[in-house]
């Protein structure tokens, strides 16, 4: 209501014909005592419905970027436009309305699930906190159990798992649970920070396939961050390559093998 | 509490079973003994624990007085049992209050960090600088001797160790990604602390508390022994020890009974802590 | 054959974790053991150096050069470690004690193996570090001041220091990102050329297998389901499970071939 009004009308939003879903402009973040910025003047657009991949080796600043986008950390400068609102400076109370639109999945599913809580208790958090009764489009909330059943079904897990603890699940199953938690409130954007890095080969492929299916069936948009060029290439329509805090190359996924790629991108390709 | 015992880490049939079983048998036997004694003392004999009977002082064991009578002719068994209730009750009270203060402060300091945490650490260090006996003596000096002030002194000394334990757990847990995710999902700090952090603390605190129980019982008894705790005629083990001191030559069992009682209960409390630690397997939270 | 394993089984309390496994490694060979987590490949590698947890029992024979390792006493095994067989693990952080400098680790390692002169130890430590492409100044640093890739290189430097005849790398690149993982692999391959040691490389990453291995065995649930030359297995897998593993590999482009055409 009030927040929505502000979202649409607070000044400064770039006025254009078709606005991207997520627009990051000149985002920078330097840790105290560091020699160079972890995130150095990064800008990009994420269009509705697409998957944008970000490749970089560890220490390139990709995790800092995702933490800034989620407002776990605050960027030093720059803006993050989410559906017409700059959320980079929003205070915690106003931010809560935007939390519903953006979710994150981290690398290590064991750390992303509270080991002392049953799967159901971890899964329900976003719905309880962020949805506030507005109806969902793909999932329906008639009862807690029915809702959680749908979530687990969507990530191809048996519904009985909701009464288990994380350590009773395999790594691949746990990562599916964190994915279920992220899609459950039907956000606009999901950030994936190395979602397959801690899974074994067979689960990696299966999780990537699942993510691709969910994106089209639920109409989601992804920012997919990984060091695994092959995984990023497999799932993304557009790709960016990040090195030492900067985006050094960006291109359509189909143009990965093109001769015009940045030398660093070529180096990455050569090792796969 | 469920835990997967993975094949690689331990042989379940060797280590897990025998110690707890032996301890359980000892504890059950002791409880049976106390129950029978209480039944005999309170249902059949019904002595008044503070009724002095100067003609019947320092009697030996008999059916009427299974443990004899003390220097004022009071029944020792009755006083021993009631003293146990006193000692244990006050120990649990002190422990409970220390937990009620320590746990929330620890969670808040560990989760909020920053100046809240720095302030907490300073205050905690200050409290830790005083040995418990000194605090108890000073407090009784200031407020007068009595069991209430003794409990207060124990709370003042003990809450810090719980708060620090809880703080260190919360410090490491709140760095984990599930807390970050809870925050991005809009959970309030209070809710994160209650839903996501509290369950991590319970096991650790329970173990520490049960190990502490023995120490607190000892502290209450020893301070009562030097006259700072329970005041006569309240039956309390430490005070009973003190009362019987002049008669040690002629009636040593008057000191042996309460002494033995203290030893047994402290031992049992430590065994309980040990068992709980095995049950909650604090170290072995398997992350396959 | 530098190492030949015959009918090796590893059991834990009536459960069989590794089931009658046999394979061999030639001197100077790069042999890969591929499988998913839980297939028993790490246990197998631990059995070679008698590093299994005490509740696991290994039976069969592990013939290393002239002797059956399973019959050797712990003391004999200790003298073999480092010079005969050496390990690199996935957990490079666990390889170093956090509050001691890198140099202190190198120093102690040489001391244990009988190098008495401290100046010689210093020179050798610096050489070892430089040989894996790290600056000798890192000797003064502490483990947490190094990146994952640097730590794993330092771990490799210690493993190679006493020129072992067999190096066992257990998921040595799994905890690293693909770029540092690649550099570590290049280093391992170069070191093998230089020293001629045999490598038993345990992994689930086909990219490394394709690039560096001579032969490989595929392991599933404690059994070796397929063994053979790299080109044969990658280009013509016979076992259903091998095919499934190859298909799951995150590879650019359509299929994972062994690179036979590129080489010829």
Image (spheres, coloured by chain):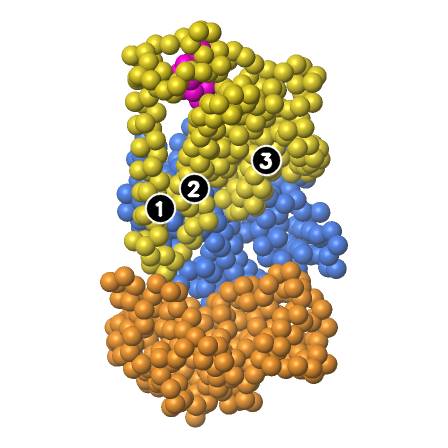
Chain colours: A blue, B yellow, C orange
Within 10 Å of disc 3 (Cα), the crowding (few <14, some 14-19, many 20+) is many
Label 2 vs label 3: CA separation?
18 Å
Label 2 vs label 1: CA separation?
10 Å
Question: How far across and down, in percent of the image, does residue B189 sit?
Answer: 56, 32
Question: How far across and down, in percent of the image, does residue A171 sit?
Answer: 39, 55
Chain under callout 3: B
Kindly indicate whether the residue at mark 1 contacts the one at mark 2 (C-beta within 8 angstroms): yes
Q: Secondary structure at mark 1?
A: helix
- Residue visible at 42% across and 70% down? C51
Range covered by the magenta-colored residues:
B73-84
Tag nearer the camera, 2 or 3: 2
Tag nearer the camera, 3 or 1: 1
**Which quadrant holds the N terminus of chain B?**
top left
A38 displayed left or right of A134 = right
Residue B19 numbered tag: 1
Q: Is residue A197 above or below residue B173?
A: below
Within 10 Å of disc 2 (Cα), the crowding (few <14, some 14-19, many 20+) is some
Kindly indicate whether the residue at mark 1 contacts the one at mark 3 (C-beta within 8 angstroms): no
Which residue carries the number 2 mark?
A: B274
Label 3 vs label 1: CA separation?
28 Å
Q: Give A253 or A31, whichever is nearer the viewer.
A: A31
A224 displayed left or right of B135 = left
Q: Secondary structure at mark 2?
A: helix
Question: How far across and down, in percent of the image, does residue A110 sit?
Answer: 44, 51
Residue most extreme to the bottom: C264
- Residue visible at 32% across and 48% down? B18
- Residue visible at 56% across and 89% down? C194
């Amino acid at each position: 209501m009030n927040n929505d009004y502000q979202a649409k009308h607070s000044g400064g939003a770039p006025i254009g014909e078709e606005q991207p879903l997520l627009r990051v402009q000149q985002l920078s973040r330097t840790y105290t005592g560091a020699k160079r910025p972890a995130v150095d003047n990064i800008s990009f657009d994420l269009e509705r419905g697409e998957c944008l991949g970000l490749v970089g080796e560890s220490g390139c600043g990709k995790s800092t970027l995702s933490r800034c986008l989620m407002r776990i950390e605050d960027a030093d400068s720059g803006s993050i436009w989410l559906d017409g609102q700059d959320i980079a400076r929003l205070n915690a109370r106003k931010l809560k309305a935007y939390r519903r639109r953006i979710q994150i999945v981290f690398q290590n599913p064991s750390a992303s699930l509270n080991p002392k809580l049953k799967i159901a208790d971890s899964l329900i958090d976003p719905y309880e906190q962020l949805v506030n009764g507005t109806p969902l489009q793909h999932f329906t909330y008639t009862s807690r159990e029915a809702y959680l059943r749908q979530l687990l079904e969507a990530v191809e897990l048996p519904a009985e798992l909701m009464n288990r603890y994380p350590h009773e699940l395999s790594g691949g199953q746990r990562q599916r649970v964190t994915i279920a938690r992220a899609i459950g409130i039907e956000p606009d954007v999901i950030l994936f920070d190395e979602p397959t890095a801690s899974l074994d080969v067979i689960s990696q492929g299966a999780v990537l396939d699942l993510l691709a299916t969910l994106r089209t069936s639920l109409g989601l948009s992804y920012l997919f961050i990984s060091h695994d060029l092959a995984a990023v290439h497999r799932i993304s329509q557009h790709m960016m390559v990040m090195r030492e805090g900067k985006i050094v190359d960006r291109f359509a996924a189909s143009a990965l093998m093109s001769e015009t790629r940045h030398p660093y991108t070529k180096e990455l390709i050569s090792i796969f | 509490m469920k835990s997967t015992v993975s094949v690689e880490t331990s042989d379940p049939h060797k280590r897990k079973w025998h110690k707890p079983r032996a301890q359980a048998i000892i504890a059950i036997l002791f409880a049976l003994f106390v129950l029978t004694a209480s039944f005999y003392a309170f249902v059949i004999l019904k002595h008044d624990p503070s009724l002095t009977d100067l003609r019947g002082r320092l009697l030996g064991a008999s059916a009427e007085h299974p443990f004899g009578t003390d220097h004022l002719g009071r029944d020792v068994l009755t006083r021993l049992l009631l003293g146990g209730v006193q000692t244990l009750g006050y120990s649990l009270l002190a422990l409970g209050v220390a937990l009620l203060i320590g746990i929330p402060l620890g969670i808040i300091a560990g989760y909020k960090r920053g100046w809240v945490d720095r302030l907490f650490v300073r205050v905690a260090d200050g409290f830790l600088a005083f040995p418990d006996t000194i605090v108890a003596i000073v407090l009784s000096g200031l407020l007068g001797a009595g069991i209430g002030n003794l409990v207060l002194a124990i709370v003042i000394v003990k809450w810090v160790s719980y708060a620090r334990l809880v703080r260190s757990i919360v410090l490491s847990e709140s760095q984990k990604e599930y807390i970050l995710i809870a925050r991005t999902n809009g959970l309030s700090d209070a809710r994160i602390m209650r839903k996501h952090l509290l369950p991590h603390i319970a096991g650790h605190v329970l173990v520490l508390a049960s190990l502490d129980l023995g120490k607190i019982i000892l502290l209450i008894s020893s301070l009562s022994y030097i006259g700072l705790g329970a005041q006569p005629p309240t039956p309390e083990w430490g005070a009973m020890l003190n009362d019987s001191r002049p008669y040690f030559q002629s009636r040593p069992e008057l000191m042996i009974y309460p002494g033995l009682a203290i030893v047994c209960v402290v031992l049992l409390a430590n065994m309980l802590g040990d068992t709980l630690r095995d049950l909650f397997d604090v170290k072995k939270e398997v992350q396959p | 054959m530098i190492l030949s394993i015959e009918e090796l089984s590893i059991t834990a309390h009536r459960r069989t974790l590794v089931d009658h496994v046999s394979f061999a490694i030639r001197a100077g060979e790069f042999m890969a053991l591929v499988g998913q987590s839980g297939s028993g490949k790490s246990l197998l590698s631990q059995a070679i150096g008698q590093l299994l947890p005490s509740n696991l029992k290994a039976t069969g024979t592990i013939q290393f050069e002239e002797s059956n390792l399973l019959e050797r006493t712990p003391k004999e095994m200790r003298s073999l470690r480092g010079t005969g067989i050496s390990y690199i693990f996935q957990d490079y952080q666990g390889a170093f004690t956090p509050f001691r400098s890198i140099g202190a680790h190198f120093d102690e390692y040489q001391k244990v193996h009988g190098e008495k002169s401290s100046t010689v130890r210093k020179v050798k430590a610096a050489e070892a570090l430089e040989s894996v492409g790290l600056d000798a100044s890192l000797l003064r640093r502490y483990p947490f001041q190094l990146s994952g890739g640097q730590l794993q290189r330092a771990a490799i430097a210690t493993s190679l220091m006493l020129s072992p005849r067999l190096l066992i790398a257990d998921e040595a690149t799994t905890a690293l990102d693909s770029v540092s993982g690649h550099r570590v692999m290049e280093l391992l391959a170069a070191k093998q050329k230089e020293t001629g040691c045999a490598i038993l490389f345990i992994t689930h990453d086909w990219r490394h297998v394709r690039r560096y291995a001579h032969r490989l065995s595929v392991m599933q649930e404690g059994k070796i389901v397929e063994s053979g030359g790299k080109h044969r297995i990658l280009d013509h897998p016979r076992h259903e499970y091998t095919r499934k593993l190859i298909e799951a590999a995150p590879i650019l482009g359509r299929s994972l071939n062994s690179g036979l055409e590129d080489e010829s």
